[in-house]
Amino acid sequence: MILSSSVDWADVEPGSVLMGSDNRSVLFGGVGPKHEVVIKYPFRISIRPVSLEEADRMIESSEVEIASESEWELAHSRGLLFAEEGSTEALADTAQDYWGKACDGRPHRGRGQTPDVLRVWLKGNPSRRLQFPGQGSSSSKVRLVIRDLSGWAEEPPREPSSRNSLRILKEEVVICLLFGVIPSFVWAFFNASEGYIREAWLNLVFGGVFIGTLSQLFWRPRQPTWFVGSGMMSTNRVK
């Protein structure tokens, strides 16, 4: 194996890390679902991002690959990664969210036209960014990894391919009723003129639905977190 002497490496032992967000509000939510990734193999990861030119040479002549987002998160959780302020680095993953993801450390590939997953370092706190094809210039640096792994499992623990739309719909109906429609009728009962509810009940319903839907900007109940257990994903942590 021929490695560049200019690249410093950090050894990462097997372990687990939580990724994603369980908050689905519009303003404060993140990319979901929140999930656990269990990496059972040791690997080495470049302490700092590597230029594309140098990375290409190393990938052609050795067993080096671009790191997955899961590997990046595990290494970062242990304080092993560094980068220059304002720099951007690309990872191997190409997916808009985490649904359908294999949670064993491999890169997550979405279907169809998917964005590249980036990390942007600002004030020492890297954040996740997505870059779709044709959306400006791509990152000039990548994070590299050397895996002590012979191959990926054929049936890894994997998240569901999509969110539970029926559960979300039921949740939205309950929120609109409790925080929108019912309060609208209570207000009208105590403050509106006699006969207002009978004549304007439809307006009260639509107004309540609007208020309930608008609340999604700021708040929604926490969503289930997916854990790895017995070779599969579950919302109950198996000890």
Image: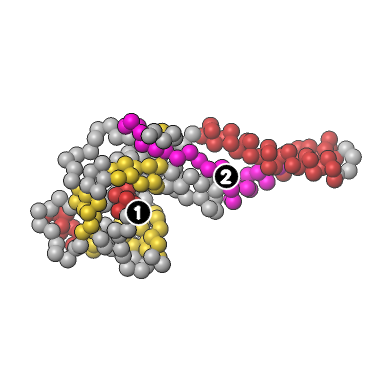
- Taking the image as shown, residue 166 lies to the left or right of residue 34, namely right
**Residue extending farthest front:** 239
Residue denoted by label 1: 77
For label 2, the SS is loop
Q: Quadrant of residue 206?
A: top right
Inspect the image, locate mark 1, and give the three-letter code of the amino acid beneath it. Ser
Residue denoted by label 2: 220
Residue at x 30% of width, y 63% of height: 82
For label 1, the SS is helix
Q: Position of residue 131 (x, y in %)?
A: 38, 55
Q: Quadrant of residue 158?
A: top left
- Please check the rendered image and state whether residue 228 is part of the magenta-colored stretch, yes or no: yes
Q: Which is more toward the observer, 109 or 11? A: 11
Residue at x 14% of width, y 64% of height: 5
Query: Does 85 appear above or below 223?
Result: below
Q: Residues within 10 Å of mark 2 (few under 14, many from 20)?
A: some
Please report the bounds of the magenta region as a residue range.
208-233
Q: Position of residue 45 (x, y in %)?
A: 23, 55
Q: Which is more toward the observer, 36 or 86? A: 36
- Please check the rendered image and state whether residue 43 is part of the magenta-colored stretch, yes or no: no
Query: Does 35 appear above or below 7?
Result: above
Mark 1 or mark 2: whose residue is earlier in sequence: 1
Give the number of callouts.
Answer: 2
Inspect the image, locate mark 2, and give the three-letter code of the amino acid beneath it. Arg
